[in-house]
Image (spheres, rainbow, N blue to C red):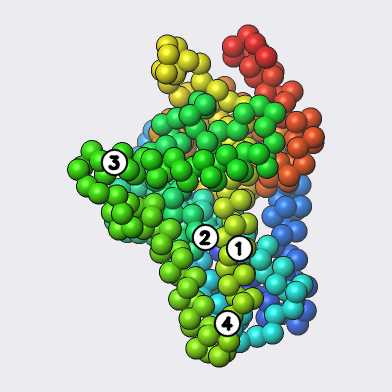
Amino acid sequence: MRKISKYGYLLVLLIPISIVGSYYSINTNLLFVLPILMFIILPILDPIIGTDDNNYTKDISEQIKDEYFFRGILHVWSIVQTSTMIWLVYIFLNDPISTKTFILLLINTMIMNGGIGITIAHELGHKTNKLDKFLAKLLLVQVGYGYFWVEHNRGHHVHVATPHDPATARKNQHYYAFWKQAVIGGFMNSIKIENERLAQRKKKSNLWTNEVYRLTLFSILLFFVCGIIGYEITNSLPFSLLVFLLLQAILSFSLLEAVDYIEHYGMMRKEVSPGVYEKVNPNHSWNANFIYSNYFLFQLQRHADHHMYATKNYQLLNAHQDSPQLPNGYPAMVILTLIPPLWYAVMNKRLEQWQDIKYGEN
């Protein structure tokens, strides 16, 4: 029987509460609390609390498949994150923000938008109803990463673990090289995907018909409107606000790309014939069944099952015991990605062992 409780997913709401509460506390040093929780305490607690390696029975899966509680959390988060971003604009236009507070707010916002927001946008982006699609785009536009909507669904899920996927990290490729590949390569690939879609429909590609261009334009307009509002309120260019909005976007999607780096590091599908690869299976994603971090990440760490069944709701994702397993959850692994020698020391041996077991090669 699975150990996980559905109410554990509500833990994510502590993140915006922590940001606002810490800011209004007597000492804004409390803004240190969230980064410490996510990148120090959580990696310690994950192995202590342990993993949940079990899966729901078919009967239970049917019971909870359409339970609105699970989808409702995603909808609530979308509203809460958007409201918190509006609040951040407000305080930047009305309060004196010290350099220390600026940096701490930046890190906190990266955790909120990049760690949780894009994860939820990813989940909503795999759904087919209009509300979920709208909320996914709303969250992505806030971090200037609207193209992820196109590239992830129609690029990454098709080409994962092949040389054609910019979001699959190669063995011995460090995160910083991967970042360029994933961000720039992913953007260019998304434009190609959209242009091909429009050509098939005999439509011209422009700022409105091409969804990559359109969502990117919405991000630019959002930041521009914030600048106009700031100018009207302060009678000067709100430089610190605009820098904050730009940096939080870059840091947020950089955190997302660190997760992408972790998920498929060194994984490659066999080419069964020229240009044709074996079907995606549980061996092509790194997995982690740690209970605590999976509450915050909505079971994203059960990544193999997600790639096998992309539209499956997060609460139903299965653990695959034959998938390669990470030594800790994503929060801990993200720290390792920033230190390539340490990452290689931890992960290359695991990768080689997995390759030897599954394919008889290193």
The structure residue drawn at horizontal position 50% and vertical position 59%, both measured from the top left corner, is 144
Q: Considering the image in quadrants, where does the C terminus appear?
A: top right
Residue placed under numbered mark 3 in the picture: 197
Residue 213 percent across, percent down from the top left = 38, 55
Q: CA distance from mark 4 to mark 1?
A: 19 Å
Q: Is residue 102 above or below residue 160?
A: below
The structure residue drawn at horizontal position 49% and vertical position 76%, both measured from the top left corner, is 226
Upstream in the sequence, badge 1 or badge 3? 3
Please tell me whether mark 2 sits on a helix, a strand or a loop: loop
Q: Amino acid at mark 2?
A: Val
Q: Amino acid at mark 1?
A: Gln
Q: CA distance from mark 1 to mark 3?
A: 31 Å
- Name the foreground residue: 338 vs 112: 338
Upstream in the sequence, badge 4 or badge 3? 3
Residue 171 visible in the picture: yes
Residue placed under numbered mark 2 in the picture: 143
- Name the foreground residue: 46 vs 116: 116
The structure residue drawn at horizontal position 43% and vertical position 69%, both measured from the top left corner, is 221
The disc label shown at residue 320, or none = none
Residue 64 visible in the picture: no
Please tell me whether mark 1 sits on a helix, a strand or a loop: helix
Residue 294 percent across, percent down from the top left = 58, 46
Q: Residues within 10 Å of mark 1 (few under 14, many from 20)?
A: many
Q: CA distance from mark 2 to mark 1?
A: 7 Å
